[in-house]
């Protein structure tokens, strides 16, 4: 494996994932070992209270392409930012620990980046996407949120929230160093938090002139989802409004 610059970095934020993390990381690494490119997998522990970090640490001993970073519990957005800015790959993907979008779908995003996109986002709504086992209420909530996002900030994307996004090296460094919602001063949390950080990432990508491709992917709803419908919907809405406010004030650079 190229120690200087792998072709692909995969960033996986984790929080209390002891039940599934070993099997899922083994699946990710097994898939990547079949690919013709060099790679690294960076797991960012978001202050887990279970044995997640210890399990990952044990796996790292036998897998040279895998490494663990430990954070205080500051949320997924902060964990993703930590991993992306610590990565070295020519391309960088972040993916959810439950593999709701299978790692095999990364080829579709890499194809879009190789074709000239700077950012490739997995979409559960683009033509050709496949959603599996999602409760109707969860789907309705997602579409309502997307409508607000399209009205207020990003009119061009059918799905901003899928946790499967890839970036060129230049775009990744530029965008993640510019975030304001959950940047270096993100607060320590007392509970899981689903946020609207993806909206800020995409707003920044467009504002900075990067080409964004929305790519249909397969996605499966998991029963272990940490989404709290009422609390997290309100947090997401506040994040969207904050991005809109920062944009109107000219606070993004």
Image (cartoon, rainbow, N blue to C red):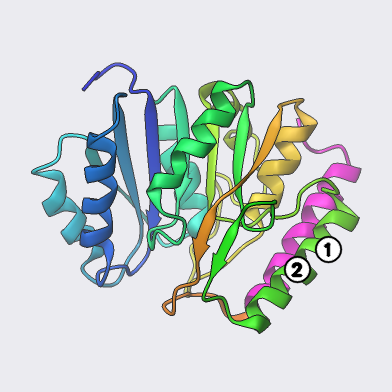
Q: Decide which of 224, 139 is in the foreground and name it.
A: 139
Label for residue 147? 1
Identify which residue is drawn at 58% across, 45% down: 183
Label 1 SS: helix
Q: Is residue 165 above or below residue 9?
A: below
Instruction: Please report the bounds of the magenta region as a residue range.
Output: 231-253
Please tell me whether the stretch drawn in magenta is mainly helix, strand or loop: helix
> Where is residue 14, by image quadrant?
bottom left
Where does the C terminus fall, quadrant-wise?
top right
Q: Position of residue 176 (x, y in %)?
A: 58, 36
Label 2 SS: helix
Identify which residue is drawn at 48% across, 62% down: 188
> Where is residue 45, by image quadrant?
bottom left
Label for residue 97? none
Answer whether residue 87 is visible to the viewer in this image: no
Q: Most extreme residue toward the left, as rendered? A: 62
Label for residue 143? 2
Magenta-span inclusion, residue 237: yes
């Amino acid at each position: 494996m190229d120690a200087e610059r792998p072709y692909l970095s995969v960033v996986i934020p984790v929080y209390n994932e002891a039940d599934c993390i070993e099997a899922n990381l083994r699946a990710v690494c097994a898939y990547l070992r079949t690919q013709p490119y060099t790679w690294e997998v960076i797991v960012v522990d978001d202050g887990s209270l279970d044995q997640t970090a210890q399990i990952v640490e044990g796996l790292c001993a036998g897998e040279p392409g895998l490494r663990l970073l430990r954070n205080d519990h500051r949320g997924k957005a902060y964990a993703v930012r930590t991993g992306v800015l610590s990565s070295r790959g020519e391309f960088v993907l972040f993916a959810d620990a439950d593999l709701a979008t299978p790692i095999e779908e990364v080829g579709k995003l890499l194809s879009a980046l190789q074709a000239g996109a700077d950012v490739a986002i997995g979409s559960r709504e683009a033509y050709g996407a496949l959603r599996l086992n999602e409760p109707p209420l969860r789907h309705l909530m997602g579409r309502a949120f997307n409508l607000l996002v399209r009205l207020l900030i990003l009119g061009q994307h059918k799905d901003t929230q899928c946790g499967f996004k890839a970036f060129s090296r230049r775009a990744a460094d530029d965008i993640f160093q510019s975030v304001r919602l959950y940047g270096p001063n993100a607060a320590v949390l007392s509970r899981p938090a689903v946020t609207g950080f993806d909206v800020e990432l995409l707003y920044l990508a467009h504002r900075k002139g990067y080409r964004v491709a929305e790519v249909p992917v397969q996605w499966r709803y998991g029963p272990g989802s940490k989404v709290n419908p009422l609390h997290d919907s309100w947090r997401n809405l506040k994040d969207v409004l904050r991005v809109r406010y920062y944009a109107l004030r000219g606070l993004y650079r």
